[in-house]
Image (cartoon, helix red, strand yellow):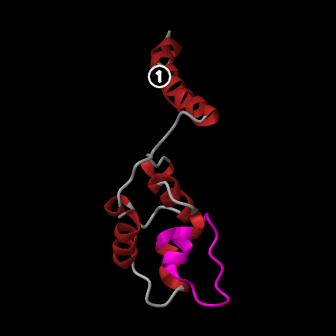
């Protein structure tokens, strides 16, 4: 008789964590909007967590154009998967605000 008291709470926990596990396994569990970048971004929409590729896709410009605007020094290779916040560590004088201003002039 005492075993039936624990059936509902245990079943609830199993169902809760099971549904989360299934959602994660199938790719349906999203905890942040950072992985999805909408098209038709403006320069103000570019954020530091975005990769160069995400910014290029959202702005509709080639990755090479954004790398040219960043203007890395000789020997510094920027990959499309590099986050914009990480560029500040490898390119002296880089700031996201300056990049946004350059992107505004590029769009004109």
Q: Vertical placement of 22 versus 107: above or below?
A: above
Q: Which residue is mark 1?
A: 12
Which image quarter holds the C terminus? bottom left
| Magenta-drawn segment | 65-84
Q: Secondary structure at mark 1?
A: helix
Q: Quadrant of residue 93?
A: bottom left
In the rendered structure, does residue 68 fall within the stretch colored magenta?
yes
Tell me residue 24's x, y (percent): 58, 36
Q: Give whichever of 12, 4 is nearer the camera.
A: 12
Q: Vertical placement of 78 versus 37: above or below?
A: below
Tell me residue 19's x, y (percent): 53, 27
Residue under the image location 52 percent in, 23 percent down: 15
Residue under the image location 47 percent in, 81 percent down: 88
Q: Vertical placement of 82 versus 59: above or below?
A: below
Circle 1 residues within 10 Å: few <14, some 14–19, many ≥20: few
Q: Give whichever of 30, 72 is nearer the camera.
A: 72
Q: Quadrant of residue 99?
A: bottom left
| Residue furthest out toward the top | 1
Q: Main SS of the magenta segment? A: loop
Q: Vertical placement of 99 versus 34: above or below?
A: below
Residue under the image location 48 percent in, 70 percent down: 84
Examine the rendering and report whether any part of residue 69 can be seen: yes
Tell me residue 75's x, y (percent): 68, 89
Examine the rendering and report whether any part of residue 82 can be seen: no
Tell me residue 47's x, y (percent): 39, 63
In the rendered structure, does residue 99 fall within the stretch colored magenta?
no
Counting labels gives 1
Residue under the image location 52 percent in, 86 percent down: 91
């Amino acid at each position: 008789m005492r075993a039936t008291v624990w059936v509902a709470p245990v079943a609830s926990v199993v169902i809760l964590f099971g549904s989360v596990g299934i959602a994660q396994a199938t790719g349906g569990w999203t905890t942040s909007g950072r992985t999805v970048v909408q098209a038709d971004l403006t320069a103000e929409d570019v954020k530091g967590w975005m990769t160069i590729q995400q910014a290029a896709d959202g702005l509709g410009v080639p990755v090479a154009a954004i790398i040219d605007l960043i203007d890395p020094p000789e020997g510094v290779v920027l990959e499309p998967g590099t986050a914009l916040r990480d560029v500040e560590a490898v390119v002296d004088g880089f700031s996201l605000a300056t990049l946004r201003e350059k992107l505004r002039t590029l769009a004109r």
